[in-house]
Image (cartoon, grey):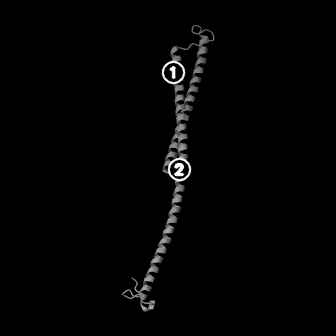
């Protein structure tokens, strides 16, 4: 029972962790989309500037400095790495949850088996106690009969062990 509670507690903790990872993924996705939207707006703004500035751009082409390009690539790489790590953690949490579910099912089955064994043991104990009471009563009845028979025997035998006249012919009881 305490093992079952521990498994349920661990399962809830894993579910909370999975929820946290989902929130992280959503935030990363939102950040990525914002970055892409900012980049698209920046690209559009740069195209407009480039179209008006003939000394930087040929008609229809956008110039991005090497530093800006490296920064954008770095941010995309960070986002991809964050998503990869979140997916790995999510997979690990899912596997752990599945393992805990299996362990919980096993614990429940073991508990059922233990309850069955306990029930059988209680039944055997009750049967044994009833038999003990019955044998005890029979023993007490036998002792009472023995005492009565000894008392009756005293009426037929004298102090020397000789059968008295009440008991029939005189015989020695040795």
Looking at the picture, tell me which residue is in the foreground, 22 or 150: 150
Viewer-nearest of discs 2 and 1: 2
Instruction: Indicate the quadrant containing the C terminus: top left, top right, bottom left or bottom right.
Output: bottom left
Left or right, 173 with respect to 17, comes to left
Who's the residue at 56% across and 24% down the image?
A: 35
Left or right, 93 with respect to 158, comes to right
On residue 74, the disc is: 1
The spot of residue 8 in percent (x, y) is: 52, 46
| Residue located farthest toward the bottom when viewing the structure as drawn | 165
Looking at the picture, tell me which residue is in the foreground, 31 or 157: 157
Up the image or down, 62 lies above or below 34; here it is above
Mark 2: give few (<14), some (14-19) or many (20+) Cα within 10 Å: few
Up the image or down, 77 lies above or below 103; here it is above
Who's the residue at 51% across and 45% down the image?
A: 7
Who's the residue at 50% across and 63% down the image?
A: 125
Question: Circle 2 is placed at which residue position?
Answer: 110
The spot of residue 135 in percent (x, y) is: 49, 71
At numbered mark 1, what does the secondary structure look like: helix, strand or loop?
A: helix
Looking at the picture, tell me which residue is in the foreground, 77 or 151: 151
| Residue located farthest toward the right when viewing the structure as drawn | 60
Up the image or down, 33 lies above or below 127; here it is above
The spot of residue 9 in percent (x, y) is: 50, 45
If you read the primary sequence from the N terminus, does the residue marked by circle 2 or circle 1 appear first?
1
At numbered mark 2, what does the secondary structure look like: helix, strand or loop?
A: helix
């Amino acid at each position: 029972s305490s093992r079952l509670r521990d498994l349920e507690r661990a399962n809830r903790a894993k579910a909370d962790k999975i929820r946290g990872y989902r929130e992280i993924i959503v935030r990363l996705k939102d950040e990525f989309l914002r970055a892409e939207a900012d980049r698209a707006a920046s690209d559009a703004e740069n195209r407009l500037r480039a179209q008006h500035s003939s000394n930087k751009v040929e008609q229809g082409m956008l110039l991005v400095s090497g530093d800006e390009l490296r920064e954008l690539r770095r941010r995309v790489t960070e986002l991809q790495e964050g998503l990869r790590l979140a997916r790995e953690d999510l997979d690990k949490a899912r596997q752990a949850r599945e393992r805990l579910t299996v362990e919980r099912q096993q614990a429940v089955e073991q508990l059922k088996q233990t309850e069955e064994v306990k029930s059988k043991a209680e039944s055997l104990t009750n049967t044994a106690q009833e038999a003990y009471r019955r044998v005890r009563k029979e023993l007490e009845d036998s002792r009472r009969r023995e005492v009565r028979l000894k008392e009756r025997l005293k009426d037929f035998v004298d102090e020397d062990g000789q059968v008295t006249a009440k008991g029939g012919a005189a015989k020695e009881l040795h």
